[in-house]
Amino acid sequence: MAFKTLSAKAAAALDQELMSTGAFSIDQLMELAGLSVSQVVHHVHPPSKGNRILVACGPGNNGGDGLVAARHLRHYGYQPSVYYPKRSKNDLYQRLAKQLEDLEVAFVDDFISAMKSTDHVVDAVFGFSFSGEVREPFPAVIQALEETKLPVTSIDAPSSWDIENGPPQAGLGSKFSPTYLVSLTAPKPLAQHFKGRHFIGGRFVTPAIAKKYEFEVPSYQGIDQFAEVGGGSVRKL
């Protein structure tokens, strides 16, 4: 099956509809997103392959998804650490961080140094709403992700990529290609440029919502909150 993609505008409208007529709260959506990401990480990188996971979180919803994923990974038996340099003052994000602190998850100040003692990186810096230039302190993070040989899982979008056009043509981020991509709810147009293993997460969309936004819900198996889709399996809507 070829999965249609959602533009940034359509994805934002879908989120708003899920939180209005869909009756979901942002807390629920973030929890479900982070849960699906944590399950993908466990699927592709079980603890037996190395249980140190470094989660890089931005200041927005994508970072919140990363915080949730880190919590679940801690409960799965991993030793996550979190790079979260621009903490939001929003109550939701503060509670997510507190939950990690209560689980004794380490918050690190130096992403580059932390990468030297990890087995897998989760990129939760920028999501589908990213545009413009990468601002401090994240340029060094993007550069490190470009250069690392560690497996990297990106949430919804490889950070620094344009949501419609994929990686930058040149400069920072142009050589960044994560190992795994977890598209939330539905793939975004940038997924057409992604060459790694691609997953869709978000097992909560109703048939009516999917029909309205004209995208396919993948065939989730068992109790999985994710479904793997093959390379080249997306087409622009």
Image (spheres, grey):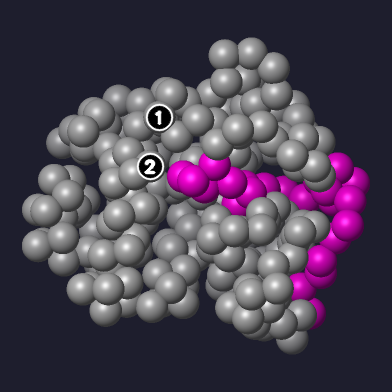
Foreground: 226 or 237? Answer: 237
Q: Tell me the amino acid under the disc marked 1.
A: Glu
Q: Tell me the amino acid under the disc marked 2.
A: Ala
Say which quadrant the N terminus sits in: top left
Name the residue: 38% across, 42% down: 8
Q: Which mark is residue 164?
A: 1
Marks 2 and 1, how far apart in space? 8 Å
Instruction: Using a 10 Å C-alpha cutoff, classify the residue at mark 1 as few (fewer than 14 neighbours), some (14 to 19) or many (20 or more).
Output: some
Residue 123 shown in magenta = yes
Q: Residue furthest top?
A: 170
Name the residue: 57% across, 20% down: 168
Residue 182 shown in magenta = no
Residue holding disc 2: 8
From the viewer's perspective, is residue 133 above or below residue 200?
above
Say which quadrant the C terminus sits in: top left
Foreground: 95 or 204? Answer: 95
- 236 vs 36, left or right, is left
Asked if marks 2 and 1 touch (Cβ < 8 Å), the reply is yes
Q: Which residues are magenta?
A: 104-130
In the picture, residue 221 is in which quadrant?
A: bottom left
Name the residue: 55% across, 56% down: 62
